[in-house]
Structures are given as C-alpha cells and as structure tokens.
C-alpha cells in the first residue's frame, strides 16, 4: 500500500522549461507606482532570468530526496508524503500540512529540525505537486473535511494511533478539522495563525485598519473571488507559461507578507521561491491547487476545543481572547520579523515553537 518515491524530473522537462523561459513575450510596463498594477516587469524578468540560467533544480531535487518519500492511494487519490522518522523510537508522530500557494517543498528546511524530536509525516495536499488529481478528475469536492479524513487514514496506515498536527495557511484549516473529527487520535494542534479574528462588530472596536481591511476583503489584488469563480480559466496560463505561473506565485507571496511596502525586504530566499514555482510547473498543478477556493474551503481555521491548541503567529492579545472563547489555547507566540510562509522564512524558530508546544503537552 506504500510505494517508495524519488523525485526524478526528466531532463527533457527541464530543457522545455528553459526554452519556454527564453521565448517569453514580455509586456510593457504599465504606468503607476511599482506593484500597484501587479508584479513589476523588471522584477519578474530578473527572477525569470535567474530561474533559467542560475537556479539549480537538480540540487534542490537532491536535497528533497535526502528525506524518505512514499505514495499511497486513499479514497481514489494518490497521496505523496515525506516520512522522516526520529532517531528516538518513542518520539511523538507529527503530521504537518503545507500552505497555499505553496507545496510540500515549503518544508525542505523544516523536516530536519523537526525530525530531531518527532516522527514527521508531511503529505502533499490533493491536487498539489506530487499528489495530482487523477484524469478524469474526481467529481466529489475536496473539502477540508475530506482532506482531514484522508490524513487520518494515512496516519492509521503508518501505524500511528496518537499524533500531533501542525499546519500553515491551508494546513491551518486541515489540522483543526483533523482534531475535531478524530480527538481520540490527535493529542494537540499547532497552527501558524488565523484564530481569534474579530468577525463580530463588538470585537472590531479599536482594531488596526489592516485587520478590518482583511476581514472586509478591501484592498489587495482580488485574486480570491476569481479563484472561487473561474479557476479553470487561469489554469491555461499556468500550464502553458512558466512566467505566468511565476508571476502569480510571486504576487501571492508578496501580497501575503506586504513585501512591496516601502523599505521592506524579501524574507524568503529566491531559491526557495523558485523551488516551489518549479514544482508547480513540473507537475502541472497550478490550476488544481486552487481547489481550496473554488470548493469554498478557503478562510479561517475552525474553532475546536476537543484538543489543546498552540499558535506560533497569533497576533494581538485581543485575538487570543477571542480565540479562547471556543478553543483550548495553551500556547500563543508571536514570531516577530518573519513571514506568512514561516517554514521557509524562519524554519528554526518555527521548529522550536512546535517543539515547545508539544513538549508542554507531554509535561501536563
């Protein structure tokens, strides 16, 4: 039921990527301040040139292949996952779920530090990377609940009856759902953020403008409504042009972290950004990865008090007070100066925060 897996992209696919990058038809720069109209041409062109002539996919492929990988089929869907066992046979199993618009490559720098303390299972979400949707696609929606049930089955097949769960962004939706459905198996949930958002009017008094804008959907590029309505249309560009795929991913990373603000710097090295973009391109999953939006699964993590919760990027104390109404919060951190993509920008501090949370549970 478990097949060993090694990443081994055909050289012809890498040659095709470079040829397509070389043949890119570059648009003229639109008037207006940089980033206000989208990704600046000069910025993307420099990154695409490096992707073609400086970035080394084979080096990152080899790096990911240092960790044991497998595939299995669950509910008609192939699931790819890393399974990195700790040297300590009594270590706590931990299933970690990546974000959107990211991939399991998000955890390249996190798997090693985590495996010092946990038996780590890191699956690729259905429709992402090496877990592509079958052809023809399954007509049943891939809801967050369906993913959570798939993760529970995966952990059962691996022989893990009690385990922790961690998630970022999309993974922060899956992990609490897993706990709510299977509290007899999940010892605790650690997420990067999203709990305690002030959705009620009485909780919004005195809130910063950026919080209110996020809740109302004001500002930003408006990508979410389009993904929810017409993801197939975008998928043609993602599948035919690596630069179109790269531009979309770069804009999401920039927008989520506010890197385009004056004086800000990129917290994630470009090789990590390009590894993620390469994985999307080489597996053709740019369109299918959008299912969290068109299935209505995007949003904030659910509240659950079945198991303890820890948060590494929680935000203001007001958020914690709101979150504590419907969650058993036992750990709340604010990792300053990092990123929405914490596993890529700050793997060491994130690993330490996860270890502190689950270590606290075992000492209780």
Image: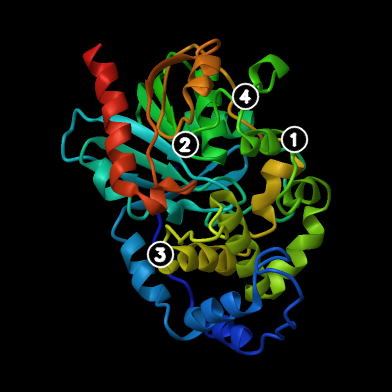
> Mark 3 and 1 residues: CB-CB less than 8 Å, in contact?
no
Residue 32, given in percent of the width and then of the height, sits at 74, 70
Few, some or many C-alpha atoms within 10 Å of disc 3 (few <14, some 14-19, many ≥20)? few
How far apart are the alpha carbons under marks 1 and 2?
A: 24 Å
The residue under the point 62% across, 50% down is: 127
- Could you say whether the residue bearing mark 4 is in a helix, strand or loop? loop
Is 205 positioned to the left or the right of 165 in the image?
right
Depth check, mark 3 against mark 4: the one in front is 4
Q: Earlier in the sequence, mark 1 or mark 2?
A: 2
The residue under the point 48% across, 11% down is: 306
> Mark 4 — residue?
206
How far apart are the alpha carbons under marks 4 and 2?
A: 29 Å
Pick out the residue farthest to the front: 206
> Mark 1 — residue?
216
> Mark 3 — residue?
269
Q: Earlier in the sequence, mark 2 or mark 3?
A: 2
On residue 167, the disc is 2
Residue 92, given in percent of the width and then of the height, sits at 27, 28
Q: Earlier in the sequence, mark 3 or mark 4?
A: 4
How far apart are the alpha carbons under marks 1 and 4?
A: 16 Å
């Amino acid at each position: 039921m478990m097949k060993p897996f090694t990443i081994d992209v055909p050289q012809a696919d890498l040659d095709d990527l470079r040829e397509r990058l070389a043949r890119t038809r570059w648009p003229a720069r639109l008037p207006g301040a940089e980033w206000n109209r989208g990704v600046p041409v000069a910025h993307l062109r420099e990154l695409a040139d490096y992707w073609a002539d400086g970035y080394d996919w084979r080096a990152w492929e080899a790096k990911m292949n240092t960790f044991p990988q497998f595939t299995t089929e669950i509910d008609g869907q192939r699931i790819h996952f890393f399974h990195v066992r700790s040297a300590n046979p009594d270590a706590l199993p931990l299933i970690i779920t990546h974000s959107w618009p990211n991939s399991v490559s998000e955890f390249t720098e996190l798997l090693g530090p985590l495996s010092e303390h946990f038996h780590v299972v890191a699956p690729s979400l259905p429709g992402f990377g090496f877990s592509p949707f079958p052809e023809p696609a399954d007509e049943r929606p891939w809801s967050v609940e369906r993913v959570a049930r798939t993760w529970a089955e995966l952990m059962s097949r691996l022989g893990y009856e009690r385990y922790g769960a961690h998630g970022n962004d999309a993974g922060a939706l899956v992990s609490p759902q897993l706990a709510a459905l299977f509290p007899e198996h999940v010892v605790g949930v650690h997420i990067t953020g999203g709990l305690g958002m002030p959705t009620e009017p009485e909780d919004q008094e005195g809130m910063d403008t950026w919080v209110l804008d996020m809740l109302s959907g004001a500002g930003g590029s408006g990508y979410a409504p389009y993904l929810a309505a017409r993801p197939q249309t975008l998928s043609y560009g993602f599948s035919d042009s690596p630069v179109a795929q790269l531009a979309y991913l770069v804009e999401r990373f920039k927008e989520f972290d506010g890197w385009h603000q004056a004086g800000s710097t990129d917290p994630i090295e470009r090789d990590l950004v390009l590894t993620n973009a390469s994985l999307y391109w080489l597996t053709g999953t740019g369109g299918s990865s959008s299912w969290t939006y068109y299935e209505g699964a995007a949003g904030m993590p659910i509240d659950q008090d079945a198991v303890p919760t820890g948060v590494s990027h929680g935000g203001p104390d007001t958020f914690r007070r709101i979150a504590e109404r419907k969650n058993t919060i036992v750990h709340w951190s604010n990792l300053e100066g990092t990123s929405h993509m914490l596993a890529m920008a700050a793997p060491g501090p994130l690993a330490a925060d996860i270890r502190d949370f689950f270590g606290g549970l075992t000492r209780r």
